[in-house]
Image (cartoon, rainbow, N blue to C red):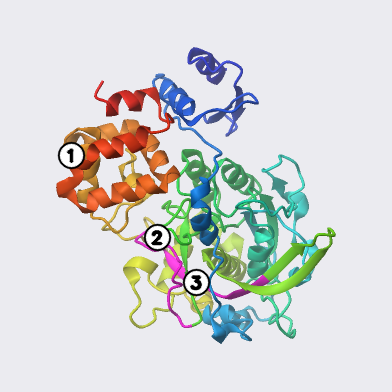
Amino acid sequence: MLARQLARRVRLTGWRVEAVVDDATEVELVPPARRVTPASGWDATYALRGQPEVVHAEPMFRYLVPENAQQPVRKASGGGRPHDPATDQEYDWSLRKANVLAAWPLFGSRPPGGGVEVAHPDTGYTWHPELGDQSRILVSRGYDYEDDDADPVDDMDDGFLDNPGHGTGTGSVILSGVGAADGGAGPYVSGVAPHALLIPLRTTESVILFSMRGLRQAVDHAATGAAAVVSISLGGLLPGFGTRRAIQRAVDGGAIVLAAAGNEVGFVVFPAAFDEVVAVAASNIRDEPWSGSSHGSAVDITAPGESVWRAVTERGSDGRMTFRVERGHGTSFAVACAAGIAALWISYHGWPTLTREYGKGNIARVFTQLLQATCRTPADWNTREFGPGIVDAKALLAARLPDAAPARKLRDPRRPAVAADATGLDTLLHLFPDVPRTQIETALASLFKVSVSDLPRVVQEYGDEVTFRLVMYPGLLGAFGRTARRLPTARSNRASLVRRLLHDGGVSRRLRRHLNGR
């Protein structure tokens, strides 16, 4: 097999070859049971990129956030903020604000969301009374890519950066059958698509992705199983080439893929930043953006995400599970709301009708076009940062289907999508949404000691590794941003930035030589 020959050629002895697609044109090289340092991982990547048969290669690190980043990362899970008192007894406010309650009667005698399969990459699932009929959780169709077994149950570990029960909470927002759907007394959860089906896919123990490998596998699993909707309440700061390819396969197969825009980091995280994905920011009961929501031109739509009532499962010290309904913050819940609306839309029009009219590969674009065209736009809404408005389920379902699919996804044409970037430059620019592009380019050119016109060539070679270093070291990321904002000092700051990039020996030999001018 060619991949094995290439591995031997670049001295990756003993590495296992795993095919990602059936024809083995995309593979993973998995190291033996030993630790691979970032430097050696990048050295291997450059060696593979140098082979004429290789179109693209990149590392898929599984890494820990530095200890001094613990608090920002915990905030990124959506916790630590007080709840809006207006939601104290408004258990279904998120459905009301998304116009879901008004959309259900449009189904007549048909069950809202009935039969639509929603793939749910997250921390796994636990049963909760708010989820209603357990038969709607398709456990046998799921998988655990964290432990590599067929049981996608959440292990409920509560270690550093873990988010036990997160998959159950976000899943309940998609399809809980208790509460407003059945006239129950509060507190309760009302799922947006109460008759949809959920495919649980355990990909991580944390909402912040430290490796895209499990998510890539889960998205491919969803595509293979022909799920109609993929709801991703997860995100990471690095794109992952294989993840984008998996999302493209899912969309080509007819899936609508939606992802959380991100919490507390300012810019839209991956995979939401990919052009093929519906990126969802979060709003509150007052029709204002949630203050912790990521924002920017990559956002496609906003949905309720602050103080949203959801199911909570907790394991006590005696091992027993307790079940509660509590509020949570985050774009995790906003995307779950939007994914439920996607399930309603497919259920309302029927999968055969949509595929016959547009073809499988165009369904996501048609949905996104209508979702944006029918949303509510509150007064003084910042459409550049939070998309055209807040989801409106009733208006979406009532809207006439277009005669043809749009040519491309409706994103801000003034800024290229990250997914369209061939050099890696836009991925770097994506980390600094509040700094003008020309200033970032000038600072990068100074760092690499090249002209701005030569920058795309150099970034294409080293950009991925530099992006990785910036993301892994928030102090370095901040220092580079400050340098870009104060361009007159960029040249004098270069030596300091280079020292910080190289300080722990974790960069490749190739990048070290370039930065040192050798």
* Depth order, front residue of 470/231: 470
Horizontal arrangement in the rendering, residue 246 relative to residue 432 (left or right): right
Please provide percent x and percent y for residue 222: 63, 49
Q: Is residue 402 visible?
A: no
The residue at which mark 2 appears reads as 266
The residue stretch that appears in magenta: 286-310
Task: Find the residue positioned furthest to the left.
Answer: 488
Based on the picture, tell me whether residue 300 belongs to the magenta stretch. yes
Q: Say the numbered circle drawn on residue 452.
A: 1
Question: With respect to residue 475, does 175 lie above or below?
Answer: below
Q: Amino acid at mark 2?
A: Gly
Distance, label 3 to label 1, CA atoms, is 39 Å
**Does 83 lie within the magenta span?**
no
Judge whether 248 appears above or below 435 on screen: above
Which image quadrant: the C terminus?
Answer: top left
* Residue under the point 70% across and 80% down: 181
Give the SS element for disc 1: helix
